[in-house]
Amino acid sequence: MAVETERARGEGRAPRPAAPAEDGRLLSTAARAVVVAALALLLAALLNAQNIYKSVYNQPDGLQRDIALAFAGPLREVSMALRLDRPRAWVESAIGREHATIDTEIVLPPPPVETTPTPASGSGSSPGSAPTGEGPSGPAAPTKPAKPRFTPENTMRLWVAGDSLVITPGYAVYRALGQNDAVEIVGDVDGRVATGLARPDVFNWFRHVAEQVRKKKIDTVVFNFGANDDHGDMTGLPKGVSLDGFGEPKWTREYARRVGGLMDTASQAGAFVVWLGLPVTRDAAQSRRFRTINRIVSAESRKRSGAVAFVDMYAMLSDDDGKFAPYLPDASGQLEKVRADDGVHLERAGGDIVARQVVREVRRVYDLWSWRNDDAGSG
Amino acid sequence: MLFPTATFAIFFMIVLPLSWLLMPSVHRWRPFIIAASFVFYSWWDWRFVLLLAGSILWNQLLAVRIHRAAGQPSLSRSLLILAVGGNLAILGYFKYYDFFVSSTQNLLTLVGIDLPLEVRTLVLPVGISFYTFMGISYVVDTYRGDTVPTTLEKFAVYLSFFPHLVAGPIVRPNELIPQFDSPRSARRVDTSRAFYLIAAGLFKKVVISSYLASNIVDEVFANPSQHSSLEILIAIYAYAVQIYADFSGYTDIAIGIALLLGFKFPQNFDSPYAAVSLQDFWRRWHMTLSRWLRDYLYIPLGGSRRGAAIAYRNLMLTMLIGGLWHGAGWTFVVWGGIHGVGLCIERWRRTRPGASTEELSVGAAGLAWRRLLTFHVVCFAWIFFRADTFGVAWEMITGLFTGWGEPSPLVTGGVLLAIAVGIGSQYLPARVPRVVLATFSRLNVVAQAAVLALSLMVTQALGPQDVAPFIYFQF
């Protein structure tokens, strides 16, 4: 420290620990500042050890995670031994928040018997196997597709969930369908940053979706996952299952199991699933990885034709050459910014483009508009 | 590298002791702090470092030339234009290129001309607006004779010093460069104020700002037509508090970190929502930008020296350009325009006959009314600042009148409490933090560390899992 250097120069006495400053507070030495800062961070680390461990655990595999775990593990042990994890737990319970735990259990329903896609189906969904909603009647007979009908008295309950990519198109879907009195929006767009299906330890979507679709009695759910899954790492693997790298056969099989399982979780609870594919991005390598994930999702949704619709955001947001397009013309030919500056997320206008396709998919399976004729007739 | 992250904490705990160890010899300290600042900046993208280095070299080269050409007015003026033009060209290219191209193309489409201009989708280097403005300060101050060019090394420290690098405050050369001349005193570190600013800044950012963003602001601004008038009104107030907590929180942390390293930055916020006029607001909000705009834009345009009409024009131009500085979009220009019109009206009221007598007779009720009015004009302008499009802004404004009595589930006790804390803190008597700091400064080392650790724990526990980047990074 400079203080010690000055002492070494032979000032002859130890430096005063503090000097008077304005407003009645004492100034300090640099050495003391460093000690207080270091001690405060150490104590704060012990008080937050459980959460530090969880966030380190949730990092992608690699040297950085291994080193961090080597520190975070013992830190957590010490914190628990000294009961220093308790104050944070008290604060969290006071505000109704769960204490940090790591949950990698994936519970999925058994896969359905594969259905044959209806030829008339434009993009994979078919009214013939529309889900059993809470309000409307169940699936229509394949020979005479009759769409389940919703009215202001018997609303279609709509929910949007996924990672951060779902937020903008999710709100656009809410805007597009929310004006219809036969549609009931159930909760805010459930967009959770840096989550996905590969790492249930970060956030367990399988558990969350299963709880939400039952609790909220969802009729239509819009999903978008995968933007944080474009790597070879997965947690929550079944016993005996190993991975062989992103996009390789074993990885693809496990990821497809999770995608299909989530689709089944929602559809077996009575929800029609609209799954937004991943968009083209500014980074060509990332776009290739996103196409790999899109192929898996598209294949799984085709297997569940009628219960699940796949919306191809990639094509929708590409330019004429299939490349990343930050601006796209609207209906009047005016250029609108459709992509955020990070080259991945969407701007509002981009969300609106996606929402229009989502509305088309919902229209294929549900009747949300004919109730207006009832009103006109009775009025 | 964001301030409220473990990565930054580790980085700073390496830099802080090393900085003080090297401080007695400033010629060893300066290269060290340049290297540390470049590491800090490269954490976003190593390519940004090239731009920062280029900006340092460009401004230093031109400042030295301008100084040498002091006796030749036309040459020094040409060099100044080149220097400022270079800075603005870089800023314009990275920040405004796509905005101008799409605006031009849309204008041409309206008149039936189809000109295929290409947008570039450039990544905006973090903090470019801030260090570009500081570079301009340096060359303009040199041209005016207010400062003498320093060494390349000291200028590099000035421009890249990591506490202010990405979101200010915008520190003037004369305020900071002299602090790099000699070692800072290791016996007179204002640690109590530094720790207070860091802890308060983290709380504002991680708890208040993030809570309001995720619990009401983002949802209402994403979809105003789905919300009641009460929700819209509270979301506007909440955004006013969110942006204040976010930006002042950042600068509090920046000032605190600089203090721990032994350096003083100017104050950047002074209870802006207690302002009694828009002029007063701009003396309290982002104070270092306000004075930059005044000294390097409003006054060079002629200020108020050339008559009333020119003064109004200059006021409007300054605020419109200030608006555009905040973001490449027309909504930001409108935001600046609202403030410009408000400032012009205030100027007209101040300069009309009998105004000074009227000012003297303003009582407590009058001041309270002015505070309320100023706050609501500022909130109205924030609608355009936050809205993605004019359509959203219009939906917000019309929604204020059309949905009263509807259910307002987003207006919760937590949201109202966060707004009350954000606004109420600006009316806190100055002696309260003074007493807190004086008491804290007399605690022993362990007690100080324990208080700080507890405040960090509470901030972490109350905040969200992920902390969004600071709003002002994009500017």
Image (cartoon, coloured by chain):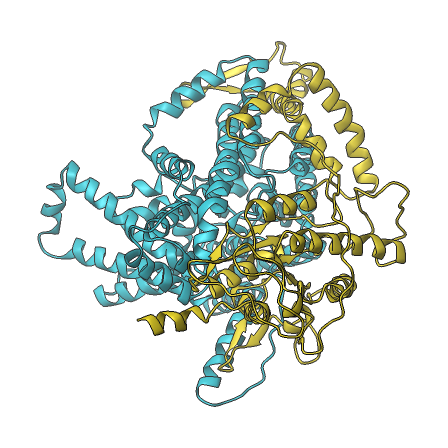
Q: Colour of chain A?
A: yellow
Q: How many marks?
A: 0
Quadrant (top left, top right, bottom left, bottom right) of the N terminus of chain A = top right
Q: Residue furthest top?
A: A13
Q: Give the residue drawn at x 50%, y 51%.
A: A186
Q: Residue furthest bottom?
A: B112
Q: Residue A317: which quarter of the image? A: bottom right
Q: Colour of chain B?
A: cyan
Q: Position of residue B441 (x, y in %)?
A: 49, 18
The one nearer the camera, B37 or B365, is B365
The one nearer the camera, B59 or B230, is B230
Q: Is residue A243 visible?
A: yes
The one nearer the camera, A364 or A168, is A364
Using the image, determine if residue A82 lies above or below residue B465.
above
Q: Position of residue B63 (x, y in %)?
A: 55, 57
Q: Position of residue B118 (x, y in %)?
A: 61, 78
Quadrant (top left, top right, bottom left, bottom right) of the C terminus of chain A = bottom left
Left or right relative to A363: residue A316? right
Q: Residue B18: which quarter of the image? A: top right
Left or right relative to B117: residue B357? left
Left or right relative to B140: residue A214? right
Q: Give the residue drawn at x 45%, y 81%.
A: B107
The one nearer the camera, B321 or B405, is B405
Q: Is residue B262 visible?
A: no
Q: Position of residue A327 (x, y in %)?
A: 58, 73
Q: Residue A200: which quarter of the image? A: top right
